[in-house]
Image (cartoon, rainbow, N blue to C red):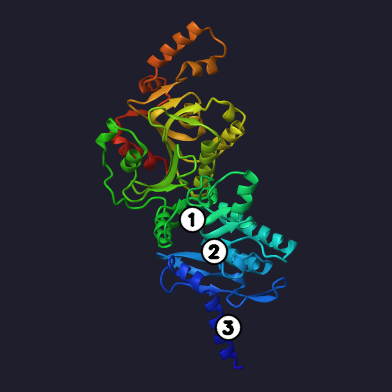
Amino acid sequence: MDIFDLLNKRKVELFKKSADIRKNVSKIIDDDSFVELNAFSFGKNEFYNEDETGLGVVTGFATIDGYPVYVVAQNGQVLNGGLSKANLDKICNCLKKAIETQTAVLYLLDTKGVQVGEGVAVLEGIAKVLALSNQLKEVAPQFALALGDVFGSFALFAANCDYVYCVNNSCISYASPAVAIASANMSITKDVLGGKDSKNGVNTFAVKAIEEVKDSIVKIFNVLPNYSGLNCECNDELNRSQLKLNTTKNAKLLIDAIYDKNTFVELNAKFADDVITGVGRIGGISTAVVLFNGEEKGVELDLNNVLKIKNFANYCYDNGFPLLTLINTVGIKQDALTATSPILAEISNMLYNLTALTRLSVVYGKAIGFGYTAFASREFGNSYTFAFADAKISLFDKTLGASTTFGTIDQDKLSELEQKYEDMQDAFNSAKLGCIDNIIEPQFVRQHIIMALQSII
């Protein structure tokens, strides 16, 4: 057979076997931008005694809204997306190029786990992919889209990515739903276990269609300091105010009042939703936020929200974001479940991560006890700490808090202390002590934050 005829024949076979996955890739990348890598890699599966056309994975280079990305797309039609040593080597080749060029990677994942018959060699291949993903984490963002089931070790791989998208009916879980449900002897849906309704902290976004992923990725690229610059021209009014903040305070109103229009992206919304984390631009400056969404009561710190803040602080450091903290917390939750969790060790890790960041904070609700120490104090990296005029800042919030702070005290003394600190909770007392840089009227919070950011970046 003529060499060119053989080439065309193999192309037809290759594209036929991977038509669906290529179509999904095309929904995210720019038109006619895909350049395939290692297209004619072939391997032999000894157990099934058949060639793997394209090794069950498509790799290449493309652009998304002009931003360069490498693409790794698992073909779930080849042995159920089963991982083999050969297709893991193909993924490794792509990741090495991404690391060398410090280029982002888009993964389309669809795998039930390793292929039967591969043996220990496939485990070594998984280790290499995970190690390269860790290296890439230091230099470029990783976007993962779960198209179907992502079980076994590649669930860990997905968890290592910066942004994870789950479409309808997809599931990311180390154990398959059948195994997980049987071992727990409970009824749980696939969506809750590791899909669009999961609160496992892996799924950054739930999307209804693949087309939504491109818009989200572009929005993220547009605020990443290493891609679009830390400071760019602001297309929103710098002195915009929000009078409603003087009487009403909620998460959406705060975000809308502070961030430039149409730039904010919330991350991991379903996990520990009493703390909101996200990125966007404020006066054209890329800025991350931790917002305590506790309404009148204030947020109590527990293991989940501490883990969320700790991991987010690490993300901010990797990507060069300054961090804005919008504080409304009454300190550590005081119950047996929290007390017996590893929360104290994780708080130490969280504080270590926060200290490494360029930070400013606004007490918009409460900063009580350790809530003040961890998030409003200058000792953990805050360059500026502002407070709303109606914020509450105090050593403790309740009689129980006084008991925790001062130990065993007579009941009548506790009541006396509670009344004393109730009278001292307004932010002006903290400002007199030099703990707060400025007391601000809520409606003008955007202007104060922009001026502070301009002075510290």
What amino acid type is highlighted by mark number 2? Thr
Front position among marks 2 and 3: 3
Q: Is residue 174 visible?
A: no
Mark 3 and 1 residues: CB-CB less than 8 Å, in contact? no
Q: Earlier in the sequence, mark 2 or mark 3?
A: 3
Question: Residue 21 appears at what percent x and percent y?
Answer: 51, 69
Q: Amino acid at mark 3?
A: Arg
Q: Choose between 24 and 128: the one closer to the eye.
A: 24
Q: Is residue 320 left or right of residue 155?
A: left
**Which quadrant is the N terminus positioned in?**
bottom right
Provide the residue designation for mark 2: 101
Q: What is the x, y in percent for residue 201?
A: 53, 46
> Is residue 302 something that shows in the picture?
yes
Residue denoted by label 3: 10
Q: Residue at x 48, y 55 (%)?
A: 165
Q: Residue at x 56, y 86 (%)?
A: 9
- Say which of 15 and 130 sits in front: 15
Q: CA distance from mark 2 to mark 3?
A: 30 Å
Q: CA distance from mark 3 to mark 1?
A: 33 Å
Tell me the element at label 3.
Answer: helix
What residue is rendered at 63% in x and 48% in y? 182
**Residue lying furthest bottom in this view?**
2
- The amino acid on which the numbered mark 1 sits, given as a three-letter code, is Cys
Question: In front of the other: label 2 or label 1?
Answer: 1
